[in-house]
Amino acid sequence: MWKRWFVRTLCVGLLAASFVGGVGHEAAAAPRPRAIEVRAREYRFSPRVIQVKAGERVKVNLRNLGRERHEWELEKTHVEIRPVAPGKTGEVTFTAPSRPGTYEFACHVDGHYEKGMKGVLVVK
């Protein structure tokens, strides 16, 4: 009788462990991206300078605190947060460029860029 209980308990434990990732040779989970909050108001971002490591996973949360729609575009990449309505948020997760350097980000909604709505992503 105890053998049947032991086998049943062992099987249930192994099954539960496999759902939690405790059994097998699965690949390790990808590290969580670093969250960066960017606040947008009329014609400026805060912060204007963001520093990241080359190849780092980054999640940008854009909070629109202004009265107009704003977007966040990382120039020369396909990384962008489409226009966000006032009081709303948008996000994008990406891997920072592998080459160190300075990459401009901007809002191109209705001439906002020309009014100074830009900043830089510094990759080290």
Image: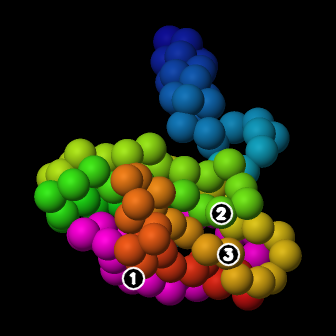
Numbered disc 1: secondary structure: loop
Residue bearing the label numbered 2: 75
Q: Are marks 2 and 3 in contact (CB under 8 Å)?
A: yes
Q: CA distance from mark 2 to mark 1?
A: 17 Å
Q: Answer left or right for 80 relative to 87.
A: right
Q: Nearer the viewer, residue 110 or 88?
A: 110
Tell me what residue is drawn at x 54 percent, y 58 percent: 73
Q: Which amino acid type is shown beneath numbered disc 1?
A: Pro
Numbered disc 3: secondary structure: strand
Q: CA distance from mark 2 to mark 3?
A: 7 Å
Q: Which amino acid type is shown beneath numbered disc 3?
A: Tyr
Majority SS type along the magenta span = strand
Residue 51 painted magenta: yes
What residue span does the magenta drawing correspond to? 37-59
Q: Nearer the viewer, residue 62 or 107?
A: 107
Instruction: Tell me: residue 103, above or below residue 58.
Output: below
Q: Which amino acid type is shown beneath numbered disc 2?
A: Glu
| Mark earlier in primary sequence (3, 1) | 1
Residue bearing the label numbered 3: 103
Residue bearing the label numbered 1: 47
